[in-house]
Image (cartoon, helix red, strand yellow):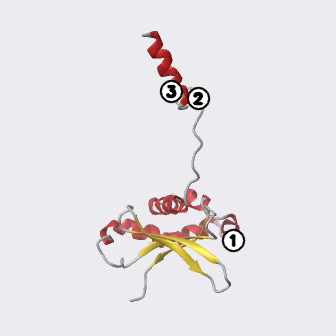
Amino acid sequence: MRNWTVATLLALMSWGLVSGQTRPQRPISQVQVARQFLLAVLRGDYKSAYGRLAPEVRQGMSITRFQAAARPLYARGQQRGTAIELYKLGFFLMETGGSKGFVAFSFPADSMLKHPPEWLEVTFRDTTTRQVLGFQLYRPKR
């Protein structure tokens, strides 16, 4: 019995489950950042959402202005629910030659539609950043 316990303990230690060591965390993706940001806005947790903004955005926007800008998303979440689903992601090609990443989420009730009537969109400066550059409740013109 003692040999089994020692072998089990050694196996657990090799997996990092007993030694107190934690496995290195994979960096959070832009999709995860966008989702966490939007869920915070939909809950009305403006402080948490504001903290996910890029420093240059926070520098130019007080939390009061941020709350005013985020209020339409919050209000829509109050009407439609706070659950969201990934709709699409990609890049906007800028006329200046660069690109800007975006992630869009729709409400689950719209998942069967070919094109949802609206979605929540979050943009990033480039493919490597994990801080929100912009956001909007997007309603395409039809």
**Mark 2 packing: few (<14 Cα in 10 Å), some, or many (20+)?**
few
Q: In x, y percent, where is residue 36?
A: 50, 58
Between 104 and 11, the residue placed more toward the observer is: 11
Foreground of the two, 78 or 89: 89
The residue beneath circle 3 is 12
Which residue appears at 61% of the width and 67% of the height? 127
Q: Quadrant of residue 75?
A: bottom left
Mark 1, Cα crowd under 10 Å, few <14 / some 14-19 / many 20+, is few
- Distance, label 1 to label 2, CA atoms, is 42 Å
Q: Which mark is residue 123?
A: none
Q: CA distance from mark 3 to mark 2?
A: 11 Å
Give SS at disc 3: helix
* Residue type indicated by callout 2: Gly
Q: Residue at x 32, y 70 (%)?
A: 111
Mark 3 surroundings within 10 Å by alpha-carbon count, few (fewer than 14), some (14 through 19), many (20 or more): few
Task: Please give the name of the residue rendered at 43% of the width and 81% of the height, measured from the top-left corner.
Answer: 139
Q: Position of residue 2 (x, y in %)?
A: 46, 10
- Which amino acid type corresponds to the residue marked 1 in the rendered image? Gly
Q: Nearer the viewer, mark 1 or mark 2?
A: 2
111 versus 29 height, above or below: below
Return the disc, 3 or 1, that comes first in the chain's sequence.
3
> CA–CA distance between discs 3 and 1?
50 Å
What residue would you read off at disc 2?
A: 20
Q: Amino acid at mark 3?
A: Leu
Q: Nearer the N terminus, badge 3 or badge 2? A: 3
Query: Would residue 128 appear left or right of 88 to someone viewing this image?
Result: right
SS of the residue under disc 2:
loop
Nearest the camera: 36 or 6?
6
Q: Residue 95's quadrant in the figure?
A: bottom right
For discs 3 and 1, the disc positioned in front in the rendered view = 3
> Vertical placement of 141 versus 58: above or below?
below
User: Which residue is identified by label 1?
Assistant: 60
